[in-house]
Image (cartoon, helix red, strand yellow):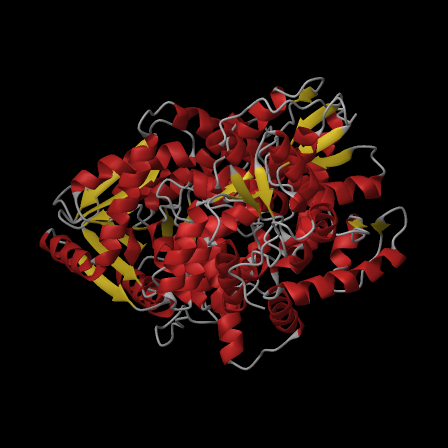
Amino acid sequence: MTTFLGMPTAPRGVGHLRQTEPFPVAARRELANTQMRRNLTKATGIIRAKRAAIVGEVPDWEQLREAGRAIKAETMAHLDHYLEQLETNVTAHGGVVHWARDANEANRIIVDLVRGTGAAEVVKVKSMVTDEIGLNEALAQAGVQAYETDLAELIVQLGHDRPSHILVPAIHRNRAEIREIFLREMGDADPGLGDEPAALAEASRAHLRRLFLSARVGISGANFAVADTGGLGVVESEGNGRMCLTLPETLITVMGIEKVVPSWRDLGVFMQLLPRSSTGERMNPYTSIWTGVTPGDGPQQFHLVLLDNGRTAVLADDTGRQTLHCIRCSACLNVCPVYERVGGHAYGSVYPGPIGAILSPQLTGIEDNASLPYASSLCGACYDVCPVKIDIPSVLVHLRARHVEAAREGRRLPHGEAVTMAAASWVMASHRRFTAAQRAAKLGRAVGRRGQIRRLPPPFAGWTEARDMPVPAAMTFREWWRREHGREHGREDGARG
Amino acid sequence: MRIALFVTCLADTLFPSVGQSTVQLLERLGHRVEFPQAQTCCGQMHINTGYARDALPLVRHYVEVFEPHEVIVAPSGSCVGSVRHQYAVVARQCGDEKLARRAERVAARTFELSQLLVDVLGVEEVGAYYPHRVTYHPTCHSLRLLRVGERPLRLLRNVAGIDLVELPDAEVCCGFGGTFALKNADVSTAMLADKMRNVVDTRAQVCTAGDSSCLMHIGGGLSRLRAGVKTVHLAEILASTREAG
């Protein structure tokens, strides 16, 4: 098996990509938060149903998915070429392109750019990548206040909280909780504020208006960048993005290098796949696309920061590479039975759910998010809904194997599990040893009551906390077969051992 | 037709009646069942836990044992899913291209029980009789790896006397996931709790599925709750007849 060494991963000590505790520990705590579970079950249920209905309308959905996958695979195969083409075209249209090796470099570039404008506050479009690199904290250290303008991001920011969903960062909050946060933190909220969605949206609108009109710097991510035109695109629902992208004098856009697409034509595929998969809408309310700088119209300074932060390491892995196809729709979160029960915070990273379980460990190196590839029952619901056909279950299994191999090479094996697996492999590779093991297992019949075992020792104790375990059968199948059929056609051909 | 049975290590050791039922069903339909006695385990647990290298001997063993057989059946969507979708990958990862090709050929002849009945043998009415209220849980790997779709339900609808009731949120995972149930026992239990609530809400006497592993999980939970709902493998229902009562 191949081990991937040498490619730099996302650095420690900056950003929000790393678990601070193993997933099972965090999950246990989150499972106890019954309010959060109710909020999530309700919200994911609604989005799931909307998505299923709206995807069901498209007769060639499977071909669209395949087209999305193929465009992304082509892009990843020639990423260097498309990125340089993008740089050339952005520069030709008056933009400035910056290359950031990692989160620290990106934050330094952006802080310097903001300082250069003399601005003390910036308005932000909802962006996963700025959260990934911890940009708001970096700006705060430099004395610059960043204001989130997406409603859900605003709720998270005002609530001194962490996002828990890619599309709906405050999905773990219900409207009563949001009302409380607004009243407590907004400063200018009407004390008679109700908790109807329209009232909450209006309160945030009034709160944000002053910022939109006064901010001199806007910061955004990007849903895509078009290599052959130099165009950047942001897809959103609230219009706050449009404000941030057009009103300030300076616009700084940060994007992961995987967001580039080869040509304008390719957007036809993604503009169908993305809204239907993410919000369950035929099209999203606002799509902003801009190319460099237009004199006298919109921001007169445009900077594009291209971020690696471990992505080249992902690209280097044949199986893991497809993770970079992700268009951040979050359909996989909404169908995941694990995510629905534990919520996004349990994953410890800004990227939660199934996609987070494969993306975060690859960006940081598996040792820093070692429990995430195991945070899945491998049910496969995520793969079925992924608009670009990322085979998440296979990547999870691949990452588990990489984790085991890395532990082996680091001589951190054998631990109990590895010894058990090696022993089981040895036993199972021969039917004689397997039959002997079956005979030994029958001793377990003595500890059962009414055919069930109610308590097992570690590592099986977790099972019997909530489930009985049947005792081994008095007569195994193969013993029955020998009794019934003798050896007449119980051939042992083709087998060793 | 001569059909080789891969009984799976789990059914062999813990649920022999699943294997016996598969044999009785196929023999009743006029087929000759063979049981290659050298068989052991598919190795899925090793593969899915990250121990591909330890799984390799089991992959090779399965290929060697079943290579001489034209048609192979297993009463498990999960084990067949592993044979069909993981074997060649594991062999290639371990640098054994020759084994990968052999595995692909054997995998193409390995069928889950409902696939064998409907697609290979062309039967949907197997002459079964099962006078009980039953709900069916489609296991994840049969559904999403093998795409068995409605096949098990078509077989069940043709069972005489059965009262087949729909399971709410049927396609949501029961939370088993192999070693997931041990490594993430709390999340697994939360998933199981929702599955059990849905099963109990149907007021079915029996919950059935095509995988003994998922049934062991659901059944283990129901047993602990003394819910009064039994778990019975699809093969056992299809093997039941009026005569056997």
Q: Nearer the viewer, residue A206 or B223?
A: B223
Rendering coords of residue B40 (x, y %): 61, 58
Residue B171 higher or lower than B125, as above or below? below
Q: Is A455 positioned to the left or the right of A25 in the image?
A: right
As drawn, B22 above or below A310: above
Q: Position of residue A269 (x, y in %)?
A: 26, 36
**Where is residue A15, by image quadrant?**
bottom left
Residue A182 appears in the picture as rendered: no
Q: Looking at the image, which residue is at 74% across and 54% down?
A: A463
Q: Residue furthest left?
A: A92
Residue drawn at x 52%, y 67% as measured from the top left: B57
Q: Position of residue A70 (x, y in %)?
A: 26, 45
Left or right for A110, reference B103: left
Q: Position of residue A178 (x, y in %)?
A: 59, 38
What residue sits 30% from the left and 40% below the top? A66
Above or below residue A203? Residue A260 is below
In terms of depth relative to the viewer, which is nearer, A447 or B225?
Answer: A447
Label count reads 0
Residue at 12% over, 45% down: A295
Q: Is residue A480 visible?
A: yes
In the figure, residue B173 lies in which quadrant? top right
Q: Looking at the rendering, in which quadrant would you find the N terminus of chain A? A: bottom left
A286 or A138, nearer to the observer: A286
Relative to the observer, which residue lies in front, A182 or B41? B41
Q: Quadrant of the C terminus of chain A?
A: bottom right
Direction front: furthest residue = A488
